[in-house]
Amino acid sequence: MITFGSRAGGSCQTRRAFGVLIRIDAVTKRYPDGTVAVDRLSLDIPDGAITVLVGPSGCGKTTTLRMINRMVEPSEGRILIDGVDSRQQPVNTLRRSMGYVIQNAGLFQHRTIVDNIATVPRLLGWNKGKARDRARELMERVGLDASLAERYPYQLSGGQQQRVGVARALAADPPVLLMDEPFSAVDPVVRKGLQDELLRIQDELGKTIVFVTHDIDEAVKLGTMVAVLRTGGRLAQYAPPAELLSDPADAFVEDFLGADRGIRRLSFFSSAGLDLLTGPVVPAGATAEEIAARDTGGSPRLLVTDPEGRPLGWAEPDALAAGPVDAARLLSYGRPFVAGRDSLRAALDCAVLSPTGWAVAVDDTGRVTGVVSQQAIGDAIRTAHAAGAKTEGATGAEPDGTAEPGTDGTAAKAAR
Amino acid sequence: MSGLFDLPSDLQHSYLGLVGLHLREALIPVAAGLLLALPVAQLCVRLRWLYAPVLGLTTVLYAIPSLAFFVVLIDYTGQTETTVMIPLAVYSLVVLVPAIVDGVRSVPQETLDAATGMGLGPVRRYFQVQLPIAAPAIVAGLRVASVSSISLVSVGMLIGNQGALGNMLYTGMTYGRPRLIWLSVISTAVLAIAVDALLVLVRRILTPWMPRGTRPRPAVDPAAADRLATDGPGPAATARKDAAR
Ligand SMILES: Nc1ncnc2c1ncn2[C@@H]1O[C@H](COP(=O)(O)OP(=O)(O)OP(=O)(O)O)[C@@H](O)[C@H]1O
Ligand SMILES: [Mg+2]
């Protein structure tokens, strides 16, 4: 077993242990025209996690991915699957044991959706009925309505086609999924839906996924491990996304990550440790005495809630004490964050958006659990950074007190 | 007064017999041409350099007058249907080979990549992916080849009684019987239209996966359609060819 750093929910920097499923061992690919697409690349791809290959166009991502299922044969080096050289088994047996998803899905336009999904099971010799039952089961898993089963690809939207592509790759329950920019041809909203869906599926099925993208945000969102490649097919850095954001290996990686990597890194810290104040939160019908008795914790305004505890808006304490509030005159509370589930990045975003500079925390049902100032969030960020630095590199170290125990890394990612 | 469909005895067939013979002599060559064109086209798809010479060869063969074929063939196959059908089969290649090649090439690269990535070998890829997706283009080629073949069968009269409806036309001209001439011309045209309509139906049945209301591969494959319409043996080209014989 080799241990890989993994992001987990909260400020904890837990190290999850994964086995290596795919070992890319000093692999070089030189195309017949002399182009070196991949140059002595070595990568250990962990079992049951999402490994993202990211880098600028032409850096050899597709070539690397295709060497894993031998659509491209390496010029030098070897690839071990579960410790065995990938050339040991017949090439089509190897490919049927790995789901393959590409941009624009690459669906068979002449086959119905169920028959598309049933392709690999049929190749493996399942009878038609069983293969189609399995296909329908998968349609449900990837969020496709059963009524689409007998349609043809041209009758589906781009996003739906991409879901079919994922379902088709999962059909024979392969341990490995290879995905080559699967979501890059759909609009941002659909893409976010597909990404969340992939994280959910990964969480449920625990597949080993190798995911190619040129979008660093997608890499950081999806990856348990992220390999940044540079032009010429060389590895620039291989690390968990949080580490990538905090410690880029060189100027190339830093440049590739973009300007706001500090802010984005906050995605990896949970909001669970924030000190939420309930003092400035008052129900709509509160009396003047009740309001006067409040410890507002430094907040210049009070957050008014409805009888169920849902936020209505901010009010001046004096105006509130003077009598019933007019909902239209309340100051907007912006967008609340879900305490514990959302990250510090979400909490900070809420505070920045809020006209009062205070963020509103709610629970899963939308009821207010407290409010927190930008100042307090800033303090939490400093604490989290310090804790992160302390545990960095310490394999197996327990998270410190601010961490939420047992938060699953994948689930935390899905929430972002 | 003789009935509309009564024929002189030297035609050796009833009207329906002649129609059957005409269809057989026209369509068996197209079927044989298809069987030959499929592997040839696949070879052209795999070995790109082969396509241009193959296309050149089919054009040269198409340019050979059927009479020249008959002169050579008659020593081997005699004054039979086979002698008529062999040149017709050869002529069909000039349409069918490019139609199949263009059809197979129109399969999107990502569809092929997906097939390969899922573990379909070359044979499965051909029969399960390329051929079905090429079907509309192939049927389009078959339509042109069949119609042209139906009009060309008539030249069978050059070697005796093998021209089917062509012989009826010849008899009508020899005996000065306009009824036979009209019957022959109209019957040939009706056969061509009927076979064409049948092939359109076949394509509809084969391709429920095509967006409705679109013509066969209008966007994907305009080159093939253009070639068939302009310099292929379309009605105009066929007429020119007939005139030349
Ligand atoms: N079949 C081929 N023959 C020659 N060169 C190739 C071939 N395929 C890819 N290349 C070259 O190898 C390099 C890497 O290509 P590859 O497709 O792996 O890049 P990529 O990282 O996937 O790029 P993109 O993000 O644009 O998809 C490029 O310079 C490309 O031009
Ligand atoms: Mg690529």
Image (spheres, rainbow, N blue to C red):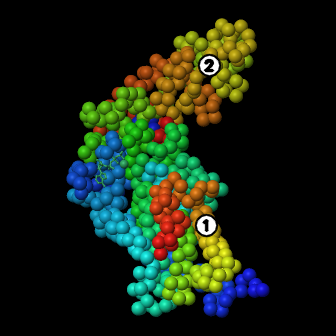
Q: Secondary structure at mark 2?
A: loop
Task: Tell me the chain of label 1.
Answer: B
Residue B200: mark: 1
Viewer-proximal residue among B3 and B178: B178
Residue A340: mark: none
For the residues carrying marks 1 and 2, which lies nearer the camera in this image?
A: 1
* Vertical side of B22 occupied by A159: above or below: above
Residue at image position (59%, 29%) is A362
Task: Tell me the chain of label 2.
Answer: A
Residue at image position (42%, 82%) is B69
* Vertical side of A240 occupied by A130: above or below: below
Q: Which residue matches tag 2?
A: A332
* Vertical side of A169 occupied by B166: above or below: below
Which quarter shows the N terminus of chain B?
Answer: bottom right
Q: Amino acid at mark 2?
A: Ser
Residue at image position (38%, 54%) is A47
B45 vs A320, left or right, is left
In the figure, residue B110 lies in which quadrant? bottom left
| Percent x, y of residue A127 | 55, 73
A50 vs A234, left or right, is right
**Is residue A74 something one can see in this rendering?**
yes
Residue, far right: B1
Q: Are marks 1 and 2 in contact (CB under 8 Å)?
A: no
Viewer-proximal residue among B73 and A108: B73
| Percent x, y of residue A408 | 47, 43
Q: Amino acid at mark 1?
A: Val
Residue at image position (60%, 53%) is A155
| Percent x, y of residue A30 | 23, 54
Q: CA distance from mark 1 to mark 2?
A: 64 Å
Viewer-proximal residue among A280 and A247: A247
* Vertical side of B227 occupied by A51: above or below: above
